Image (cartoon, rainbow, N blue to C red):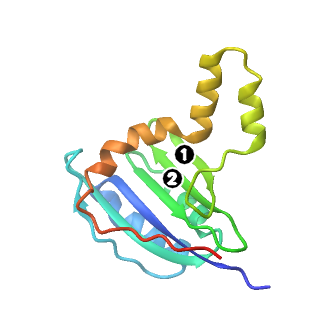
Amino acid sequence: MATPVARGVVFIHSAPKALCPHLEWAVGRSIGKAVNFAWQDQPVLGGARRAEFVWDGPAGTGAAIATAIRGWEHLRFEVTEEPTPRSTGGRWMHTPDLGIHFSPMDAAGSIVVPEERIRAALENLDPLEMRRELDTALGSAWDDELEIFRTAGDDAPVVWLHKVG
């Protein structure tokens, strides 16, 4: 059985200018073809650049892209992979301070929190600790840190989502 073709988007929220060609090379290597991003200045962080790139490739390519670009300092990014009829989707978020966070995604684009994470959070009798556990499972700290960089790109092109199934 053939590997399903997945689609997704790489959002480089902020990268130093000198890193931009290296990111293109790493993403291109992950998807098996050369890529050129449409770089723009990142207004939130002087000297930084931002870009969005739509990709397609075998299911699992999102993980390969996130792995290829996660090690660089001063880099903020998100990689999404839409689910296919035979594979789950995912979202990888990275910030310099927090590192990387992965969340599985369902066909509607919602984060899926695995049962064992919810059960572990519910074992806490302290409501504040329970909230902390669930916030971690949802990647709330990553969302909070990346939000200002996302809104700086509100004039960016619309990102499409595909119906699965």
- Residue found 48% across the figure and 35% down from its top: 141
Q: Foreground: 133 or 165?
A: 165
Asked if the residue at tag 1 contacts the one at tag 2, i.e. Cβ–Cβ closer than 8 Å, the answer is yes
Q: Is residue 36 above or below residue 62?
A: below
Q: Amino acid at mark 1?
A: Ile
Q: Position of residue 154 (x, y in %)?
A: 26, 56
* Left or right of residue 24: residue 4: right
Q: Position of residue 86 (x, y in %)?
A: 73, 73
Query: For residue 108, which quarter of the picture?
Result: bottom right
- Residue found 58% across the figure and 41% down from its top: 138
Query: For residue 105, which quarter of the picture?
Result: bottom right
Q: Amino acid at mark 2?
A: Arg
Q: Is residue 97 above or below residue 160?
A: above
Circle 2 residue = 70
Q: Foreground: 102 or 163?
A: 163
Q: Position of residue 145 (x, y in %)?
A: 40, 38
| First in residue order: circle 2 vs circle 1 | 2
Q: Foreground: 165 or 29?
A: 165
Instruction: Report the label total.
Output: 2
Distance from the alpha carbon under mark 2 to that under mark 1: 7 Å
**Residue 48: image tag:** none
